[in-house]
Image (cartoon, rainbow, N blue to C red):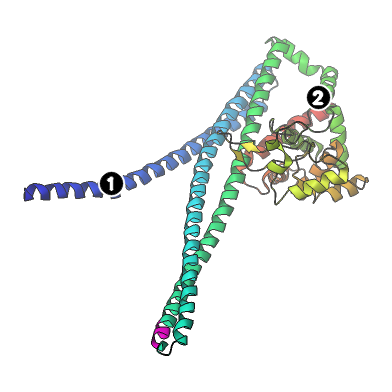
Amino acid sequence: MNTISSFLKKILLLFLIVVLFVTPFNFVLAGNETQVQLEQELKDIQQQIDQYTKELSQTQSQKSTLNAKISQLQTRQKTLNLQIKQTSLQLTKISSQLTATESDIENSLLKQQNLKKEIGGILRQMNTTSDNVLVQLASMNGLSDAYNKIREYGNLTRELEIVLKQNQILTIELTDKQVKLEDQKIETDNLLKISSIQKASLGESLSEQNSLLVKTKGLESNYQAVINDKKKRAAEIRNRIYELFNTGKQIDFGQAVDIAKWASGLTGVRAALLLAILTQESNLGKNVGTCNRAGDPEEKSWKVIMKPTRDQEPFLQITKDLGLDTDTTPVSCPMHDKNGKQVGWGGAMGPAQFIPSTWMGYKNKVGALSGKGFANPWDIRDAFLASAIKLKSDGADGTDDGDWKAALRYFAGSVNLTYRFYADNVLATAKKYQVDIDEL
């Protein structure tokens, strides 16, 4: 019986070793393997994207034929599909990190709550002990007891110092974690915007291909006739609607070019680059300008969707100065993840999508340069000029490198290669616009 019991104990001990040591190790290993696989997949996708980019560069230098144009569009679509997948994987990666940080913060808050309870308990003990010291001192035979109570009080004081130090360290760690969480939310918000731009670009490319095939009926002769009819093409370019949100009216491409050239003359920023930036900003998806409108529910109010400590006071000031109704002036909505959870903050204004706090630093410059003395982020000309001023300060100098970096800073505040698609797409759009401008 003792032998069986001893044997069972050994089996139980072995089981506990497996549970406590082997299982966690395998779990961590599996997690690490997942991260490694994710990184490798992202690397493989980037290599494919680089290859397609190289192919696209080669086909663009070929003679302008219908087949070459269709081939360019199809390569572009393959590239965009890969980039959409790449962004999706990046979102999966940051989502996992964000969840871990949120859990870490919750645990730290719980620890802090327990420490505060412990501090409260020590303080109550100290208060009781100090009262007892006075009672003992009032007694003729209480000196010895009073001395012991004073020693106890000293021990409690040292214990309190230790716990207070622990709380101080935890508070610093908690602040760092909250900053980390905010950075992760900003990255998630930016990646969601990038994803929106990529999907819109894919839709535009597919639409352009279908339109081209319908227009030419698949015949090379029809395609050559289309591209050689300069007068007809110039009219189509000029009359094409240039989509801008929150302006109260639509303008055609010819009018947009005139405004861009005006802003370019005042700042030195290329008109084509300016048009590309504003196209991308105003077409970041259906979130643009769909919050804080008359009739919108409370959860879409500026009081909910704007960052309280950063943008609410400036927004109140901007709308007051312009005589606008703060509660019904449209602004952008925040982005939401795949689960519908709000990520980051909304509140960007007008075609150039300046957030209120940023606009406050540019409105006087815009008003002075335009000669009006004031600026309105929902006014088309002011939006163009504000974007031009910002792009110039971000390093736009007419070169591909300078303009590319300026576009990235315009979007992310720095040259962060995680969001390089934004700048790549802006430059590609600017080149197409330059061709259109040259043909007007």
Which residue, given by chain and number where applicable, does mark 2 sit on? Answer: 241
Outermost residue, front direction?
Answer: 139
- Image coordinates of residue 355 in percent, x first then y, are 74, 44
Which quadrant holds residue 242?
A: top right
Where does the magenta region start and end?
Answer: 144-148
Mark 1 in CB contact with mark 2 (< 8 angstroms):
no
> Residue at (77%, 18%) from the top-left corner?
227
Q: Which element type, helix, strand or loop, lies under badge 1?
A: helix
Q: Amino acid at mark 2?
A: Ile
Q: Amino acid at mark 1?
A: Val
Q: Is 145 in the magenta?
A: yes
Which residue, given by chain and number where applicable, does mark 1 sit on? Answer: 19
- Image coordinates of residue 253 in percent, x first then y, are 83, 27
Q: Nearer the viewer, mark 1 or mark 2?
A: 1
Which quadrant holds residue 266?
A: top right
Q: How many numbered circles does the render carry?
A: 2
Q: Earlier in the sequence, mark 1 or mark 2?
A: 1
Q: Which element type, helix, strand or loop, lies under badge 2?
A: strand
- Image coordinates of residue 187 in percent, x first then y, are 60, 44
